[in-house]
Amino acid sequence: RRDAAIKLAMDQCRQTGRKFEDTTWPPMPGRATGSHQPCVYNSGAPGPGMPVVTQWLRPEEMAGADRPVMFRNDYSVEGIIQGAGFDNRWFISTANIVSANRGQLDRVFFGEVDPTWVTYGFFVCKFYHDDPQSDDDWQVVLVDDRIPCIRDSEGRPMPAFGRNPDPSVYWAMIVEKAYAKIHGCYQALEYGLMDYALRDLTGAATMKMLWKDKHVQEKLVSGELWDDLIK
């Protein structure tokens, strides 16, 4: 499925001579300009207090993106800033946790981001999805690098939702877009649970511990709890 997604994207790029455009998400060409945004909002229009998206831009078209790059370097990543007026901290927090392990984050992109993907403006991600009728529990998602944008206080375009502190770095926007795509729209990510997001981004089983539990407190005092957490 990964190879089929890459072939689909590259075939389109060869035919058009341009960067890849996912014609299904959003289902509008170019900057996808318009007030009706079904890939952003459940009803196609923003609710009270939500960011108002009217166009989708590529990283090089956004304000402050001086020579945009997926990652600043090969060994570390920055955190993610949550978009204003939109509460998906459960996903943002999880992505921050996963990004602390660069190798784990790379696995969302099948091990390492291919420079060809960056050049042609597409990315292939994978998320865990339990499928009782299949031995393969990974869902493959193809996205382009067009990101829903709003205007800042000076009228300049900026990402509407999650973003990296460095405006030239955009891996967080791609991961969030791919995750929003499999959920139907960005607004579908407004509420959720971190343990589910951790499972989806890593494929690993999660476990909840009650902070007030006596056994947990004993492990905290002894230092054993930290050893368990970093395993």
Image (cartoon, rainbow, N blue to C red):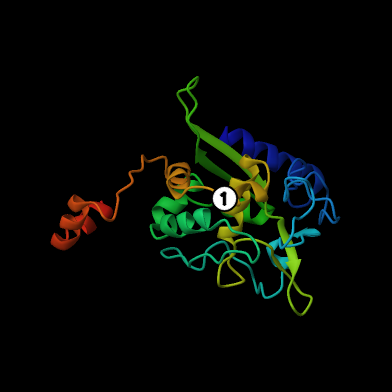
Q: Locate residue 139: give its quadrant.
A: top right
8 lies above or below 36: above
Tell me where residue 161 appears, x and y as whole percent: 64, 61
- Residue located 41% across and 51% down the image: 104
- Secondary structure of the residue carrying numbered label 1: loop
Q: In this view, does 95 lie to the left or right of 224?
A: right
- Looking at the image, which residue sits at the far left? 222
- Where, quadrant-wise, is the N terminus in this rendering? top right
Which residue is denoted by mark 1 in the rendering?
A: 191
Report crowding for label 1: few under 14, some 14 to 19, many 20 or more residues within 10 A (C-alpha). few
Amino acid type, callout 1: Tyr
220 lies above or below 29: below
Front in this rendered view, residue 19 or 91:
91
Tell me where residue 130 appears, x and y as whole percent: 47, 30
Front in this rendered view, residue 87 or 80:
87
Front in this rendered view, residue 114 or 36:
36
Question: How many dots with numbers?
Answer: 1
| Residue 75 visible, this orientation | yes
Tell me where residue 125 appears, x and y as whole percent: 55, 44
Q: In this view, does 189 lie to the left or right of 19?
A: left
- Looking at the image, which residue sits at the far right? 34
- Residue located 62% across and 33% down the image: 4
- Residue located 50% across and 54% down the image: 90
Front in this rendered view, residue 202 or 185:
185
Q: Is residue 55 left or right of residue 92?
A: right
163 lies above or below 117: below
101 lies above or below 133: below
- Residue located 73% across and 47% down the image: 39
- Looking at the image, which residue sits at the far bottom? 154
| Residue 230 visible, this orientation | no
